[in-house]
Amino acid sequence: MTALAGVIPVQIGGETSNIEVVRHVPGVGTALDDFVIEAKWGDKNIRVLNPISLLASKLELAATVSQDGRNDVLHLKILVPCVRAFLETILEQVEQQAIPARDWLGLANQALKLTTDHRARRIGEKHQINWPDILPLKAINQSRDEKIRTFRLQQLEQGYRKSKGISI
């Protein structure tokens, strides 16, 4: 369901895989530069979607495309611990004062918004996905950053409670 521009076959740990080059990702929009992580792979610089953007895409596909022969729901279940680890890694950088708290807050609010709307709740209930597990609650609770503590009190505790019975 993506606008596939090409496929690059690669060997990773003895396994054959593909890197898909796309022009558009459902649920993410057209400004993909805002949603990527740059990394080094061998001697190449590559750009991949961050896990929260991939979550947005998979939510869109799970909600709008027949899942016959597709794995979008399975991918959503896999993304829960992936997004949690991603958010925890970024929060560690905030705690080390390597990046501003607002960078983490933007990502966390994006994840919160994606997983508390009606569509996500319906998908979660139907497929037994516990969306609050997507957040690194232990790390959030242990944060020394004032903005992160405020997020916990105002956004998390109130946000999930307001979202129709989801509790953290």
Image (cartoon, rainbow, N blue to C red):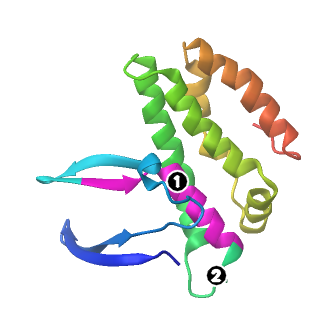
Q: Residues within 10 Å of mark 1 (few under 14, many from 20)?
A: many
As drawn, 153 above or below 12: above
Residue 166 drawn at (x, y percent): 81, 45
Residue 146 drawn at (x, y percent): 60, 12
- Would you say 18 lies left or right of 80 here? left
As drawn, 67 above or below 13: below
Q: Give the residue displayed 79% in from the left and 39% down from the top.
A: 160
Mark 1: amino acid: Ser
Tell me the quarter of the image containing the C terminus.
top right
Q: Give the residue displayed 70% in from the left and 71% down from the top.
A: 63
Was residue 141 drawn as part of the magenta stretch in this picture? Answer: no
Q: Which residues are magenta?
A: 46-63
What residue is shown with label 2? 67
At numbered mark 2, what does the secondary structure look like: helix, strand or loop? loop
Residue 158 drawn at (x, y percent): 82, 30
Q: Give the residue displayed 48% in from the left and 28% down from the top.
A: 91
Q: Give the residue displayed 21% in from the left and 72% down from the top.
A: 10
Mark 2 → mark 1, Cα distance in angstroms: 20 Å
